[in-house]
Amino acid sequence: MGLQVMPPGIREFLCYLRFYSLTHYGFVSSIRGDGANPAAPRAPVRFAGHRENAMARPRHEHPTPGELEILQVLWERGPCTVREVMEALAPGRHRAYTTVMSLMNVMFDKGLVKRQPRGRAFVYRPVETRKKTLSAMVGDLLGRAFDGSAAAMVTHLLEEAKLSEDELDEIGEAIDAHRRERGER
């Protein structure tokens, strides 16, 4: 009786549901019609061309541009909720609450931010200071792109950036201050 009494379409839906649950969770059904033991361990389903995490993005050691934008808000304003960060982000660029929340959850998973519950929301704060984060990023760029040569990196910056006279003076003053600290000159 069972399935024959069901209204039209229900049987197909149940078959689809069973197929989906078996393939989605990666297991072969223990009810295969071949007398398989239902207590036997289930084997994962493998399809031709299947790769583990085929669509997974590589994990970045340093913050991505979107994460860095959120960190800038947290460094400037201090601990914030997702809504406060969303409102502080570039005003001309609207982002959905869930988009910002997802990105901040990824940042939490990566260890870029800490969070504490406050009512029904979380309050996020950066794990590292701005200086430490930017130093790590610049150090990585220096090592990977300029083979560790600070002179090559600064030369490239001076050639490529459109620096004003004030910015050039500020860079010169920073170099002079660095020399004084080292006892040179």
Image (tube, rainbow, N blue to C red):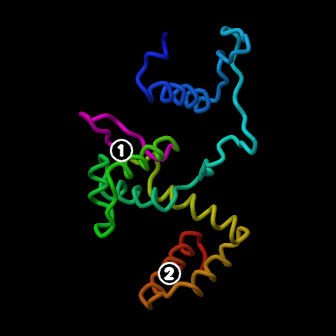
Q: Is residue 89 magenta?
A: no
Taking 21 as reference, is 74 left or right? left
Q: How many marks?
A: 2
Q: Is residue 179 above or below residue 58?
A: below
Q: Nearer the viewer, residue 132 or 177?
A: 132
Q: Nearer the viewer, residue 106 or 153?
A: 106
Q: Nearer the viewer, residue 179 or 63?
A: 63
Image mark for residue 124: 1
In percent of width and height, residue 149 lies at: 70, 72
Image mark for residue 35: none
Q: Nearer the viewer, residue 80 or 131?
A: 80
Label 2 crowd (10 A; few <14 / some 14-19 / many >=20): few
Kindly identify the residue that appears in the image at 69 percent across and 65 percent down. Answer: 144
Kindly identify the residue that appears in the image at 70 percent across and 30 percent down. Answer: 45
Give the residue at mark 2. Answer: 171
Q: Of marks 1 and 2, which one's residue comes earlier in the chain?
A: 1
In percent of width and height, residue 65 lies at: 49, 62
Q: Is residue 177 above or below residue 48?
A: below
Badge 2 element: helix
Q: Majority secondary structure of the magenta segment?
A: strand
Bounds of the magenta segment: 111-123
Instruction: Quadrant for residue 73, please give it.
Output: bottom left
In percent of width and height, residue 173 lies at: 48, 81
